[in-house]
Amino acid sequence: MLNTVAKDEAPAAEQELTDGFHLIIDALKLNGVETIYGVPGIPITDFGRMAQGAGIRVISFRHEQNAGNAAAIAGYLTKKPGICLTVSAPGFLNGLTALANATTNCFPMILISGSSEREIVDLQQGDYEEMDQLAIAKPLCKAAFRVLHAADIGIGVARAIRAAVSGRPGGVYLDLPAKLFSQTMEANAGAKSLVKVIDAAPAQIPAPDAVKRALDVLKSAKRPLIILGKGAAYAQADDAIRTLIEKSGIPFLPMSMAKGLLPDTHPQCAGAARSTVLKESDVVMLIGARLNWLLSHGKGKSWGKPGSQKFIQIDIEPKEMDSNIEIAAPVVGDIGSCVSALLAGMGDNWTPAPADWTGAVKTKKDENIAKMAPKLMSNAVPMDYHGALGALRTIIRERPDAILVNEGANTLDLARGVIDMYQPRKRLDVGTWGVMGIGMGFAVAAAIETGKPVLAVEGDSAFGFSGMEVETICRYNLPVCVVVFNNNGIYRGTDVNPSGGTDVATTVFVRDARYDKMMEAFGGVGVNATTPDELKRAVNAAMDSGKPTLINAVIDPTAGSESGRIGNLNPQSVLKKK
Ligand code: ADP
Ligand code: TPW
Ligand code: MG
């Protein structure tokens, strides 16, 4: 039903009116938007209230960046654009980091921001929260639109939705000036102006010759490898991907957020033999994974000798091909269509990957897994990373449908390696930028969008970027268990101030802080855990009860290493240290 407002001075022929507020709500509802993540204020406070009144779930955060991260991950989890709603200028800017991060990660989201009066902004006459938001958003997202007339709201919302989810997904900015909200128009015309987006992300079928080329390259392989990226997880083509992998017998390497697309315990999973397969494979098929820094750009010492490896790449974005090295067989299309076409082309008599190769990968993998096993049993107190993660690994094995959110440096890199995932789209982390601050936003949206329990494994620094949202978690009573790996600082808690002055080192926090008290402050459960056993018990209790819980896991402050696993990316001074 269309919302309407009565006109103050109704003309003789009683005309029903609608306005910007109602048209935006109707346009969102018409397109299946069920949840908005945001922070209220001028000019969108009433809009939030009215959206809630109209049955949209409106989740209010304490900071827009977290609302934006929630919207972005909602988009990733559902393949529908997540919606973030912010106030003008400062609120908009706070949301912008999340919008840019969504674009970088190929997550579909729409940042809807109220803005000030165009006439005043453009003449720079000093309006309340004046800012040329559209111009600022443009370079940071896939598309940016502004709606000036109520009659264009339907088209504006439709364009935003289509831009966010079609082709390579990403962030879209929708600018709604304050005046638009109260603009009126005739209700029937308003209803007709709305647009239901049909087939928002159309299938993109790969060209038959591209598929044939890819199969020819694959057929020639003696040591093939498949790399699954988060695009493959996003595509929700889980069955087709599994069939391709099992039919081909090719070892697969999941990128961080693709873990669980097939279980990490799958016999063909080469996660524990990563360096071997990158170096020794002769044909690499990338499925929804970019050859960016996370894969050392497809060259250099992590890879085989130049020219010794051929790449097949499946991606919806044609410009991604040859971005870093030559792609021998580009397959452009959506992953579901591409993988199905490859399967059809493979027929029933496909020769599986050579046994000497798959055997060698398995031997290496078993060796590495055996090497790690005793570390995971560590009962050292204070806990080291492996001891604490060993406990969490067991919990995810026993509760494979829980969603794992993960950020930090050592806390991220080690958890990625230690905690096996068993189901698709269950691991959400810092993604392409390695950005800190996604934790609580992701956790809130994961709980709301899926209804599953969430385990957020957070470095103490990482947690701090979004920590205030524990109030949000308590307010909405979400089944989120946050574990803060508290090692008193960034990477380590033991650095000293090189000047000998009284300030602590730049990477060090208050010693022995009790993050668990933060959750207690808002009525949630707080636990201080000093052993793997205590940690395990506390997480299990949290997951059984579904109560918001924060566990302060006391980690040995000497245990971490600089920047976790990517210390090599730190520039080094060539001058002698004083
Ligand atoms: P990872 O970090 O896991 O390696 P990336 O974010 O680098 O993954 O790569 C994801 C890739 O997936 C992007 O290049 C994006 O264009 C692509 N992608 C996203 N969705 C689809 C889809 N439905 N079909 C094909 N490719 C997709
Ligand atoms: C938005 C730089 C990378 S990792 C990290 C920072 C500040 C925190 C590491 O400490 P933590 O983990 O979380 O305690 P641990 O286990 O190693 O002690 N600002 C942004 N993003 C990034 N990546 C940084 C700063 C950084
Ligand atoms: Mg830390």
Image (tube, rainbow, N blue to C red):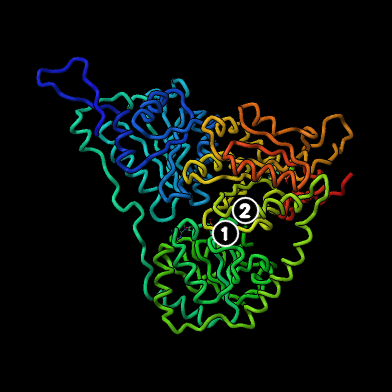
* Quadrant of the snapshot with the N terminus: top left
Residue 301 lies left or right of residue 322; in this view the side is right
**Does residue 552 show up?**
yes
Mark 2 vs mark 1, CA separation in Å: 8 Å
Q: Please tell me which residue is depicted at 61% across the width and 82% down the height of the picture.
A: 355
The first of marks 2 and 1 along the sequence is 2
Q: Position of residue 89 (x, y in %)?
A: 49, 28
Task: Give the residue displayed 73% in from the left and 41% down from the top.
Answer: 553
Q: Determine whether the residue tagged by mark 2 lies in a helix, strand or loop.
A: helix
Q: Is residue 372 above or below residue 2?
A: below
Residue 122 visible in this rendered orientation of the protein: no
Position of residue 123 in the picture relative to residue 385 (left or right): left
Q: Which residue is mark 2?
A: 396
Asked if disc 2 and disc 1 are in contact, CB closer than 8 Å, the reply is yes
When asked about the image quadrant of residue 367, the answer is bottom right
Residue 230 versus residue 554: which sits nearer the camera?
554
Expressed as whole percent of the image width and height from the top left, the position of residue 309 reads: 60, 75
Q: Tell me which residue sits at (87%, 47%) in the image.
A: 577
The percent position of residue 281, horizontal first and vertical second, equals 62, 75
Q: Amino acid at mark 1?
A: Tyr
Q: Which residue is mark 1?
A: 422
Specify whether tag 1 is near ligand 1 (CB below 8 Å): no
Q: In the picture provided, is 405 more to the left or to the right than 158? A: right
Mark 1 residue element: loop
